[in-house]
């Protein structure tokens, strides 16, 4: 039973779709009200939203690791904010969560279309995703499997995921992607309402998922500056297979660097915020995930 | 006779095409060397480039007004930088310019394709543009006619313009637009070389130009926050006619606001950096400009 669901926007202050959807729902809360649970909406990084920046000191969406939340010596803007938000929407790992489900709204400069980034293994999370895929067949699912502790916003609640839509530049609202994100959130609310009311939902027990394998960085010089760009033939080709020998990067001297490796799907191709994180794209495999009900 | 030409990049620190083209040419200066004139390359706002931000205190590309350059009390980061750059590449309005021609490299999140923004009326400037349009037929020309003093970077030299390419998000390099910008700069260098050497160029004396008429802001609330987005049917339609009654904005409540006015071309549609400047797009008329030789 989901008693409380949080819709969070502006975790990154320059990703406007989530910011303005949350503003819309704070003005018209009836749109996200349902009879069987409480919906809360939260603007996450208000200073970054004001400055139309991703973050002030460091990435809020990498600030919800358990050890960071417990470390009282961390006093950056986002470290303090993460603790505050964990108090409000967490607490992470606790037995009495304030919120049962978090959907965190993001955008990307990559051509990710309408997609979900999931790193939660709960059955409720996966049933929700199965429902959304049924309602919106073009929705794609990326399962994050980083080698570090999950420190995303949605990790502080028992269930949840992030919605990523793109391509949209930072600091820009695109009406089409705004409408698609909005519709997807309403489907999620409908799902929770139906589940709570015990409605029997005919959901698939097997989902096609893009499973994270590794991150691929840009070629860089000794100072760490990039010396190549995503090749023009790879640009925009998220959720698309890349095979041995296909163009991957173009150096600033206009030389093509090809892909060497087994066939993989490329995701988050040329995302603006990931230049500093040190990756040009994600490589993923398409797998079937069996949902155990 | 052009004795010295400057290629400037990173006037806005998050517009990476110009930044990395200038870095490329600083590493391989022979690429922009020509026999009859000197080419200099300049990274303009180095602190903003480092922080991948448009500017630190205010927009450098609005900081080259004569009165601002003369005002010694202005001591913001960009005000001081503008004076320094004017000393290096100017001086604006002076009789002995250090540089005869400035081409300033920009990108935009709008779908402006490959375009020139010109606010200089010199014959040399317009002949250069005519040559570029001949070499690259898809190039479009936007003549800026603001009601304020021209304070763009290129205004400090006797001749020049800005190149704008898009759509590309801030903080992103797109290989295709990088290559197109590079090729256009080489055409410009060829033009100057030919002119200097007295080659007879068969250039058109009439150019099709998008003439600035006015700026159109987003609908906003009393606090100045936007309450509508560019309508999904107008998104990406730069250099495209809008007519009476066509969809213009979509409010956050999903209501369409239509365009009311005479047919005009829309430019810089939904450019990220212009949300704070207070406009959603530019309205322009297509006119013929006669170049007097």
Image (cartoon, coloured by chain):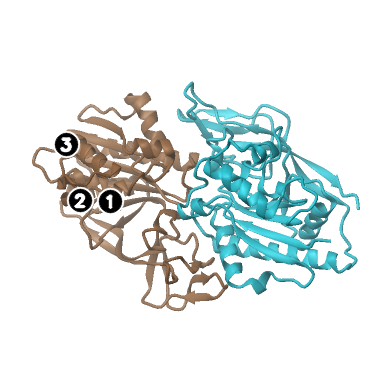
Chain colours: A cyan, B brown
Q: Is disc 2 surrounded by few (<14), some (14 to 19) or many (20+) residues within 10 Å?
A: some
A226 or A238, which is in the foreground? A226
Q: Residue furthest front?
A: A72
Can you say whether B203 is above or below B268 in the image? above
Q: Which residue is painted at 84% across and 45% down in the image?
A: A289
Residue holding disc 3: B198
Q: Nearer the viewer, residue A22 or A248?
A: A22
- Which residue is at a point 64% across and 29% down the rendered structure image? A259
The quadrant in which the N terminus of chain A is found is: bottom right
Secondary structure found at label 1: helix
Q: Are marks 2 and 1 on the same chain?
A: yes
Q: Which of the labelled discs sits on residue B65, or is there none?
A: 2
What's the distance in space between the residues labelled 2 and 1, CA to CA? 7 Å
| Residue A139 showing in the rendered view | yes
Q: Are marks 2 and 1 in contact (CB under 8 Å)?
A: yes
Q: Chain of mark 1?
A: B
The x, y position of residue A93, in whole percent, is: 76, 45
In front: label 1 or label 3: 1
Disc 2 secondary structure class: loop
For marks 3 and 2, give the CA distance: 34 Å
Q: Residue furthest left?
A: B95
- The CA distance from mark 1 to mark 3 is 35 Å
**Residue sitting at 78 percent across and 55 percent down?**
A129
Q: Which residue is mark 1?
A: B62
B63 lies left or right of B106: left
Name the front one of labels 3 and 2: 2
Left or right position of B42 against A11:
left
Mark 1 and mark 3 on one chain: yes
Q: Secondary structure at mark 3?
A: loop
Return the residue nearer the eye: A21 or B202: A21
* Mark 1 or 3, nearer chain start: 1
């Amino acid at each position: 039973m989901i008693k409380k669901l949080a819709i969070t926007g502006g975790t990154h202050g320059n990703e406007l779709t989530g910011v303005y959807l949350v503003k819309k729902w704070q003005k018209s809360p009836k749109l996200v009200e349902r009879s069987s649970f409480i919906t809360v909406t939260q603007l996450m990084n208000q200073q970054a939203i004001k400055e139309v920046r991703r973050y002030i000191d460091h990435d809020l969406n990498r600030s919800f690791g358990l050890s960071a939340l417990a470390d009282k010596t961390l006093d950056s803007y986002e470290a303090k904010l993460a603790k505050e938000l964990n108090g409000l929407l967490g607490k992470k790992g606790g037995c009495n969560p304030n919120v049962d489900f978090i959907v965190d709204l993001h955008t990307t400069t990559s051509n990710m279309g309408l997609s979900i980034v999931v790193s939660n293994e709960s059955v409720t999370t996966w049933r929700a995703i199965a429902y959304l895929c049924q309602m919106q067949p073009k929705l794609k699912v990326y399962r994050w499997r980083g080698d570090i502790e999950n420190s995303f916003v949605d990790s502080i609640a028992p269930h949840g995921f992030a919605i990523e839509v793109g391509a949209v530049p930072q600091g820009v609202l695109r009406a089409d992607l705004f409408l698609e994100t909005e519709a997807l959130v309403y489907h999620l609310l409908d799902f929770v309402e139906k589940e709570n009311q015990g409605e029997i939902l005919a959901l698939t027990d097997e989902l096609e998922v893009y499973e994270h394998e590794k991150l691929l960085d840009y070629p860089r010089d000794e100072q760490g500056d990039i010396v190549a760009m995503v090749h023009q033939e790879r640009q925009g080709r998220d959720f698309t297979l890349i095979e041995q020998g296909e163009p991957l990067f173009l150096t600033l001297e206009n030389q093509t660097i090809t892909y060497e490796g087994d066939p993989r799907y490329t995701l988050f191709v040329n995302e603006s915020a990931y230049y500093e994180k040190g990756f040009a794209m994600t490589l993923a495999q398409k797998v079937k995930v069996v949902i155990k009900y």
